[in-house]
Image: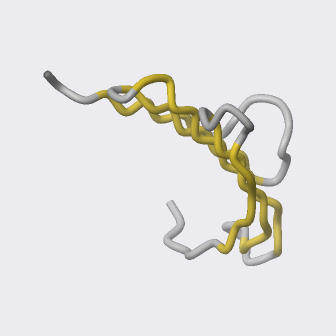
């Protein structure tokens, strides 16, 4: 696990349901690598966060689904 701060820039989709951000930051070995995050707002009660490191295509390294309890 790596505790770092990343500076990413990105845009929101025209419908406002997805935010995609891209940037560079340190890799676990100390070299520089690419990062990409994508947050999809499925509903007011459900968001899906995905993160890629090293490559910004293919399967994400991490996926987190956030759901509000009712």
Give how far across and how far down residue 5 sits, in percent: 56, 76
Residue 50: x and y in percent read 60, 38
User: Along the line of sight, which residue is nearer the eye, 30 or 16?
Assistant: 16
Horizontal placement of 62 versus 52: left or right?
Answer: left
Tell me the quadrant of the picture where the C terminus can be found. Answer: top left
Q: Which residue sits at x=71%, y=47%?
A: 20
Q: Position of residue 43 (x, y in %)?
A: 43, 24
Q: Image check: 10 left or right of 43?
A: right
Where in the figure is residue 41, as x and y percent of width and height?
51, 32
Residue sitting at 60 percent across and 33 percent down? 17
Q: Is residue 10 above or below residue 48?
A: below
Q: Nearer the viewer, residue 68 or 54?
A: 68
Q: Residue at x 81, y 75 (%)?
A: 31
Q: Against 30, is 22 above or below?
A: above
Compared to residue 12, the image places residue 25 above or below, namely below
Q: Residue furthest left?
A: 70
**Residue 38 occupies quadrant:** top right
């Amino acid at each position: 696990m790596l505790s770092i701060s990343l500076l990413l820039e990105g845009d929101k989709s025209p419908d406002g349901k997805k935010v995609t951000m891209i940037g560079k930051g340190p890799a676990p070995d100390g070299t520089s690598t690419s990062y990409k995050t994508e947050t999809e707002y499925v509903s007011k009660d459900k968001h899906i966060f995905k993160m890629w490191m090293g490559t910004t295509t293919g399967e994400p390294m991490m996926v987190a689904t956030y759901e509000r309890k009712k």
